Amino acid sequence: MTACPTGIAHTYMAAEKLAQTARSLGHEIKVETQGSIGAENVLSDNDVRDADGVIIAADKDVDRSRFVGKKVLVVGVAEGIRHPEQLIERVQSAPVYGGEPGDGAGGAAAASGGTGGSGGTGGGKERSVAYKALMNGVSYMIPFVVVGGLLIAISLAVGGHATPEGLKIAPGSFWEDVNNIGTIGFQLMVPILSGYIAYAIGDRPALVPGMIGGWIATHGELYGMKDASAGFIGGIVTGFLAGYLVVWIKKVKVPRFAQPIMPIIVIPIVATTALGLFFIYVLGKPISWVFTHLTGWLSGMTGTSAIVLGAILGLMIAFDMGGPVNKTAFLFGSGLIASGNQTVMGMCAAAIPVMPLGQGLATLIRRHLYSEQERETGMAALFMGLFGISEGAIPFAAARPAQVIPANMLGGAVAGALAGMAGVADAVPHGGPIVAVLGAVDGVPMFFVAVVIGAVVTALTTVALVDVAERRKSGARAGVGGGAKGSAGGGAEVVAAADAAVTAGGASSLVAGPGVAEPVVAAPGVAEPVVAGVGAGAGAEAAAGGASRTAVAVAPVPGVPGAAPGQGTDGEAVDVDGVETDGVEIDGVNTAGNDVSRDGRGVDGGNNSDGGSGDSAPSAEVLSGYLTEQTVKTQLDADGKEAAIREMAELAAGTGKVADVDELVRVALAREEQGTTGLGEEIAIPHAKTDAVTAPVVGFARSADGIDWGSLDGTLAKLVFMIAVPEAAAGDEHLRILALLSRKLMDADFRARLQGAEDKAAILRALGEIR
């Protein structure tokens, strides 16, 4: 099984390499791919049951429960591309997965965040369990932040008015109901974060203690804090505590009769009780002490410089966004309003919107550093910031605390100091531009100046720190495992898990995805057949004397159709997505021998066993018509990556679909900064999502000498494809094209035909196979 957060090229390349190698070794294999569009070529219960081993190549958490009792090998996805033969050999001696974190080959390294060695002796670099757990919690929390925040913002904008107690909505009104619904979303935000962090570590038994622990963290009255709580930082703490507590409890040996009730009764009750009491009696007291003493310390600061006080309040407001430090500063400022000192609240009001505005602005400044979900969250954060809802920045702080929290604090300090210097006053205990619009702020021009400058400082600092962090990760990945690394933004790295078990006495058989013979499949979360899934453990072996089977699941590319061009050899039958062929079956494609036919149409010379190019004419459409004779160049003039991308962009411009060549080049190069699109095997597929193109377009060119593209295997790129799609079409189309290309390009004969094609017509004829 291969799974990648971005699920673009490497997912399918690993699947195809494993499938080809397994067939060449006489194994039966079925590969399940898991990408952002879900699982494809899913391994069934029977597949898992009959398989001898499971290979998992993944860079995200995958449900391994269906692989309990199977031999499981977990490695990086790059290992699936570079060393498939070694993985298939290693899976035969992999340990049996028992359902615990760290079970299965490569699992221990994963649990500790370590890496295996390179080549065939290591597991490839995998994200630590802690990182994956945090990302899991953040991904589930984001919808609650967005929905809750936007409902509150809309209700305040339409139904709110300024009062001495803050922005208020008329009791009993429609907008009060809307506000209450949004408030519920915010109340659930931290428990969801905590619960799904715990779930990623300890599985289902950890979900309840994690959520209840998160609820306790946000309700300070349970541990002596009437007006504040531990906030989202407390929720992160309870999530990890709950997860690892459950893992520890699972290791306790209990009588057989008690085992069935452990995960549904005993573990959740014990873990929830222990965690809740620990937080209330142990962690809660220090948090309450900090809150009390910070308030006293601030009271002694009222006679100092307004600039210094504003900077300190801004730092505190921005630190934990709803936590004890934030609430201390906010309540200090709001408490002074009644005494006639409104300038302290003015400092707080200027700092409050800086975090969501700054983080939202950062997603606009450097879009390529953020995932699509993060960019959407950034837009919501901008809207929340206008209404003084600082929680809009929490998803960013939770995902990248080391970069985001310092940036938030710097911007908040700048905004608070500027407001203090200008003597900005706020008559209501609320912040953000909304209070100025409603007339509660004195010194409106300088208030907006402070907010804007603070937000810009936060955005620029965030972008700089995130960029530095990503470059460091890229550099580190380049030297790990012989260069194995992920190419996605956000530092996504590639992980593969392989499950191996081969029984003696016959040719072993692997289960592989599209284009693989005699599948043994397993669906996500399914038990029974042997399949490869991230974290899956290897266990049951096939009966002695029979052909052994290995299940391999591979993560598919988002937006990619279920079947992709796989290759059968020696006329082996392959059944993929209900397609049956004499050679390879792919998405309704019937192939004979090694000839591939798609959509019921034969392609002569497509995959002939003799490797010939065939005599068939080019198909009417190549890659859905996006690649045409206009966008094919037999030889590139460029000798460097940047020059090649520009030359490819100018080639695409000849179709009339490129409105701005420079912008297309800029976006493509920005994508390269996230991670190389040099896929190895002398292939590079630069791609861009940008409105610099008016319609999807694909170009292809060859380089005789090769171009240094920073490929994983160190080869120079001689086959270069460029894919450009407009933002509106980016959801599926470029990913679908990438998937088709990545899988087909793993066929050495196909690459040889492309290299040897004499002219554009011959090139188009070869490329027609991957239509």
Image (cartoon, rainbow, N blue to C red):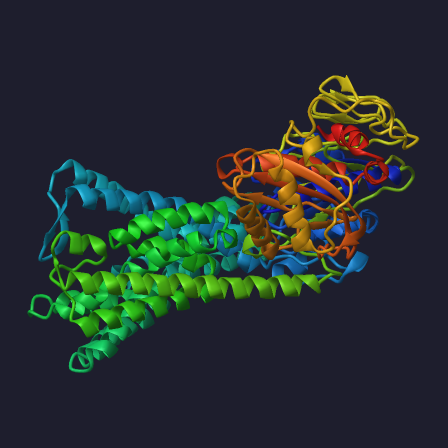
Q: Position of residue 234 (x, y in %)?
A: 38, 62
Can residue 191 be seen here? yes
Seen at 60% across and 39% down, the residue is 653
Q: In which quarter of the image is residue 626?
A: top right
The foreground one among 584 and 719 is 719
Give the total of numbered labels: 0
The x and y percentages for residue 168 are 13, 49
Q: Where is residue 206 in the image (x, y as percent from the top left)?
A: 48, 51
- For the point 72% across and 34% down, the residue is 513
Give coordinates of residue 39: x percent, y percent: 61, 35
> Residue at image x 87%, y 32%?
569
Q: Would residue 228 appear left or right of 667 to someone viewing this image?
A: left
Q: Which of 278 and 67 is in front in this view?
A: 67
Is residue 688 positioned above or below 571 on the image? below
- Given residues 40 and 100, the one toward you in this image is 40
**Residue occupying image coordinates x 51% and y 55%:** 369
- Vertical placement of 282 versus 537: above or below? below
Can you name the residue that lies furthest to the top here? 600
Asked whether residue 215 is in view, the answer is no
Quadrant of the rendering where the C terminus is positioned: top right
> As displayed, is residue 270 above or below residue 332?
above
Quarter that holds the N terminus: top right
